[in-house]
Image (cartoon, rainbow, N blue to C red):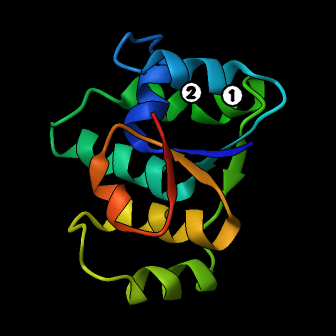
Amino acid sequence: MRLLLDSSALIWWFAASPLLSPRAQRSVKDSRNQIFVSAASIWEIGIKQQMGKLEAAAILEQVPLWLGQERFVELPISALHAKQAALLPPHHKDPFDRMLAAQAQAENLNIVSNDKAFDAYDVRRLW
């Protein structure tokens, strides 16, 4: 299975938080699955940290190391992703989540997220 972690799932994974569902934990741990992390999630974490909504300085500093250690694949934002996000219906107001939905559609990925707003798009959500 090909999985795309949303920002919260990524943070909860690295924090070993019980907020990440048991199913999501098992799926991320399963070496048969390919785990993707979008540049949009790293950007969102940085924005929230700057706004004082998240203590993410350590996360941002460690992301490159953690991605490699965890065998996660970096997913850049392409022009195709940007176009797809721009054409999505406005079910979700968060631009970062809209980008994740577009990337999941374009790359045939399952989104790992507790956010039910993704269900309004043509994506598979794992939680």
Q: What percent of the width, then of the height, locates residue 5?
A: 53, 42
Which residue position is annotated with label 1? 65
Q: How many marks?
A: 2
Relative to 46, 101 lies left or right: right
Question: Residue, x 36% and y 57% (percent of image)?
Answer: 118
Q: Quadrant of residue 35?
A: top right
> Which amino acid lies under the numbered mark 2 shown in the image of this protein?
Gln
Question: Residue, x 20% and y 68% (percent of image)?
Answer: 93
Q: What percent of the width, then of the height, locates residue 27?
A: 64, 26
Q: Is residue 33 above or below residue 18?
A: below
Q: Which label belongs to residue 89?
A: none
Asked whether 44 or 4 is in front, the reply is 4
Asked whether 92 or 81 is in front, the reply is 92
Local packing at callout 1 (Cα closer than 10 Å; few below 14, some 14-19, many 20+) is few
- The N terminus - image quarter: top right
Q: Secondary structure at mark 1?
A: helix
**CB contact under 8 Å: marks 1 and 2:** yes
Q: Quadrant of residue 33?
A: top right
